[in-house]
């Protein structure tokens, strides 16, 4: 698996020059992306008449190691970061990429359990919380001066772009039959109201993790818009 030596995956906020979420070591979404990339490279090799076996074997080893290393039996979800004798069991949304990427490293029963955990602790109408409210470090409101806001940026604030990955993961975990569930049909509805708020016709970067989920940060964020549109077209409309 991939070991990240720096402390700057996507959760890269600093408060007073100090990383708020120093995620280094074997980071869950980085290794999910690594597995996905290995499968892509293997498939590309085959499509060009080359032998993709080498990359496929590495992918198989990566998948086995990923499941063995990251699965948290106590919480029935994935660890966020692991290194040597340390395993970060704080429930964060990064694990959803292990299911939502084109080549998912987690499938079947474990995928269902992860999605259920994320639904119970991280889901909001406008994105996934960056940290579970059950954590002592959780901050549900993104407001105040720079230091206070930076401290909350990835410690509870909900990110809209993660809704797209959650929708994909949910449908993959529970199957296409879930497309007819009221829950799935309701994933997009709050955003239809939101585009009349903040920046008209667009989607904000972040929202408070606590109700009423006030929009914060950038009032028109490309990856928020892109992920909601992608999931709606590919997974909801495309699955019906």
Image (spheres, rainbow, N blue to C red):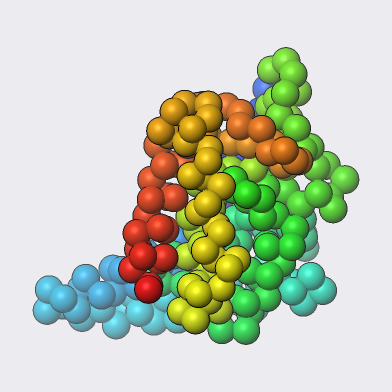
Q: Which of 188/100 is in front?
A: 188
Q: Is residue 168 visible?
A: yes
Image position, residue 86 (x, y; %): 77, 59
Residue at 79%, 37% in the rendered image? 139
Q: Specify the quadrant of the image occupied by residue 182.
A: bottom right
**Position of the C terminus by quadrant:** bottom left
The number of callouts visible is: 0
Image position, residue 2 (x, y; %): 51, 60
Residue at 70%, 54% in the rendered image? 122
Residue at 61%, 28% in the rendered image? 216
Q: Is residue 1 visible?
A: no
Reply above or below: 120 against 43.
above
Q: Specify the quadrant of the image occupied by residue 53.
A: bottom left
Image position, residue 24 (x, y; %): 63, 48
Q: Furthest-top residue in view?
A: 145
**Left or right: 206, with 141 as reference point:** left
Image position, residue 118 (x, y; %): 68, 62
**Left or right: 95, with 146 as reference point:** left
**Left or right: 119, with 217 as reference point:** right
Reply above or below: 119 against 63.
above
Residue at 40%, 33% in the rendered image? 201
Q: Which of 20/128 is in front?
A: 128
Q: Furthest-left residue in view?
A: 49
Reply above or below: 112 against 128.
below
Q: Which of 159/58 is in front?
A: 159
């Amino acid at each position: 698996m991939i070991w990240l030596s720096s402390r700057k995956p996507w959760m890269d906020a600093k408060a007073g020059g100090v990383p708020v979420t120093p995620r280094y070591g074997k980071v869950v979404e980085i290794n999910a992306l690594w597995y996905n990339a290995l499968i892509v490279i293997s498939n590309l090799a085959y499509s060009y008449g080359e032998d993709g076996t080498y990359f496929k074997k590495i992918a198989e080893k990566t998948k086995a190691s990923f499941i063995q290393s990251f699965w948290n039996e106590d919480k029935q979800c994935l660890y966020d970061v692991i290194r040597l004798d340390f395993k970060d069991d704080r429930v964060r949304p990064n694990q959803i990429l292990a299911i939502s990427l084109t080549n998912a490293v987690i499938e079947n029963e474990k995928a269902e359990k992860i999605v259920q955990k994320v639904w119970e602790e991280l889901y909001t109408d406008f994105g996934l919380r960056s940290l579970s409210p059950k954590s002592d470090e959780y901050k549900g409101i993104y407001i105040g001066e720079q230091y206070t806001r930076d401290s909350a940026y990835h410690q509870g604030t909900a990110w809209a772009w993660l809704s797209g990955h959650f929708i994909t993961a949910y449908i993959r975990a529970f199957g296409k039959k879930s497309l007819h569930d009221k829950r799935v049909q309701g994933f997009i509805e709050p955003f239809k109201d939101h585009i009349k708020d903040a920046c008209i016709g667009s989607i904000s970067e972040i929202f408070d993790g606590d109700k009423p989920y006030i929009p914060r940060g950038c009032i028109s964020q490309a990856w928020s818009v892109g992920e909601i549109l992608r999931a709606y077209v590919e997974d909801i409309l495309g699955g019906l």
